[in-house]
Amino acid sequence: MEQIIRRYQRVTGTHIFKQDNTEQRHNELARMRNETHNLQLNLQRNTDDDLSFIQFKTLMNLNNNLNTQLRRLELEMHY
């Protein structure tokens, strides 16, 4: 890689300075982690994995409806 960089610098007449950009990399990594976390939260919301925003009464109604439908299916399968 060093050879390629030197060759590029010689051909183009430019000079690439080596800088200690540890702080810049650290900040970029922190930003990427934060963005990843936010994307994961959005994914959970969009795939209905996170039901914390649904009211308890709504969840109970859904549960009751599911149970009712299951009982109907069980009865139909027996006949």
Image (tube, rainbow, N blue to C red):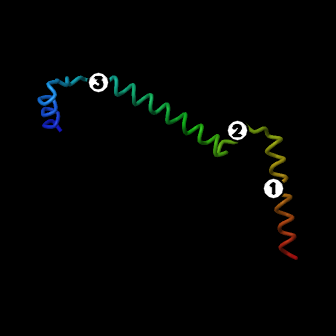
Residue where numbered disc 2 is placed: 52
Q: Quadrant of residue 78?
A: bottom right
- Residue type at mark 3: give it: Asn
Q: Quick one: 53 or 11, which is closer to the camera?
A: 11
* Residue at x-position 25% and y-position 23%: 20
Q: Residue at x 75, y 39 (%)?
A: 54
Quarter containing the N terminus: top left
Residue 13 in percent (x, y) is at 14, 25
* Left or right: residue 77 compared with residue 37: right
Label placed on residue 21:
3
At 87% from the left and 65% from the top, the residue drawn is: 72
Q: Residues within 10 Å of mark 1 (few under 14, many from 20)?
A: few
Q: Is residue 50 left or right of residue 28?
A: right
Q: Amino acid at mark 2?
A: Ser
Which mark is first along the chain, 2 or 1?
A: 2
Q: Earlier in the sequence, mark 2 or mark 3?
A: 3
Measured in 3D between alpha carbons, the distance from the residue under mark 1 to the one under mark 2, in whole angstroms, is: 19 Å
Q: Quadrant of residue 2?
A: top left
| Residue sitting at the far front | 12
Question: Which residue type carries mark 1?
Answer: Leu
Question: What secondary structure is marked by label 1?
Answer: helix
Task: Please report the residue visible at 64 percent of the width from the left and 42 percent of the height from the top.
Answer: 46
Rendered location of residue 79, percent (x, y): 88, 76
Decide: is 66 above or below 59: below
Mark 3, secondary structure of its residue: loop
Q: Residue furthest bottom?
A: 79
Who is closer to the viewer here, 28 or 3?
3
Q: Nearer the viewer, residue 63 or 24?
A: 24
Please name the residue that numbered disc 1 is placed on: 66
Rounded to the nearest whole Å, what is the CA distance between mark 2 and mark 3?
Answer: 41 Å
Task: Give the mark, 3 or 1, whose residue is nearer the N terminus.
Answer: 3
Q: Report crowding for label 2: few under 14, some 14 to 19, many 20 or more residues within 10 A (C-alpha).
A: few
